[in-house]
Amino acid sequence: MRPIIGITTYVEPATWGVWRDLPTTLIPHDYVAAVSQAGGRPVLIPEHDDTDVLDFLDGLVLAGGPDLSPDFYGAEPGPLTVTRPDRDRAEMLLARRALDMEVPVLGICRGMQLLVVAAGGALHQHLPDVLGHERHRPAPGVYGEHEASFEPGSRIAGLMGDDLAIRCFHHQGVADAGNLTVTGRAEDGLAEAVEDPDHRFVLGVQWHPEVVRDERLFGALVAAAHRHRST
């Protein structure tokens, strides 16, 4: 049986067929396809305060999405910060319990930021104010393309090898990684990867590996999920 990998979801108004702006639980199909291609069995997780679903999961993907509420790191929302409070609350509970249970976790974009804040860190709410450019989110629906550098000996360095190209879309970023270790950075110094050496598999990346179905990262999560199931 393939390891069961949970993927967190959005609740957003969506339009299809005869339906218009219907509140919908959804996720870009790239996440599902990337998990499936890597050998996992994807299961979508709607917003819920009950975290018992983790008892049935072998791994967890914290997906991308809107900004994380600054309330979680003791800051006031900036003028360009857009949050989803119900999702924030549910995913923070889910992430913290997954870490307690040693469930393998891959955090992507917002998911990496969630891991950072769960570990006591904080975010920059609008990167152009800090970095002076918009290359991490160049235009609506357009991924920024960068090269990252990775810490030798880190998990992400071992997975990425000599391939340093990343594709990202975000306007917030890590200001303080908390108890996590920053193991990858963009050319401008912004954190692009974080890890927790005290857990068997906790990896966060600021870019979007699901878009290219990156089997290195998703394969590593599925392999860790296999090991978690056998413990």
Image: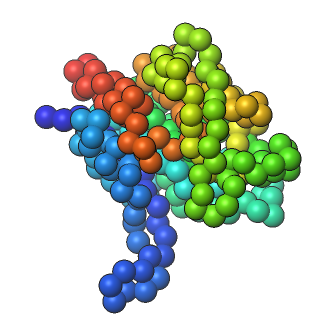
Q: Position of residue 225 (x, y in %)?
A: 30, 28
Which residue is pictured at 63% across the width and 64% down the height? Answer: 140
Which residue is pictured at 81% across the width and 55% down the height? Answer: 76
Q: Foreground: 214 or 60? A: 214
| Left or right of residue 81: residue 180 | left
| Residue 85 visible in image | no
Q: Residue furthest top?
A: 153
Q: Residue furthest left?
A: 1
Q: Position of residue 100 (x, y in %)?
A: 46, 29
Q: Is residue 83 above or below residue 116?
A: below
**Image quadrant of residue 218?**
top left
Which residue is pictured at 37% across the width and 86% down the height? Answer: 19
| Left or right of residue 43: residue 9 | right
Which residue is pictured at 64% across the width and 24% down the height? Answer: 149
Q: Position of residue 219 (x, y in %)?
A: 33, 30
Split into 4 quadrants, where in the image is the C terminus?
A: top left
| Residue 167 visible in image | yes
Split into 4 quadrants, where in the image is the N terminus?
A: top left
Q: Position of residue 3 (x, y in %)?
A: 23, 34
Q: Is residue 121 above or below residue 135?
A: above
Q: Foreground: 45 or 109? A: 109
| Left or right of residue 53: residue 167 | right
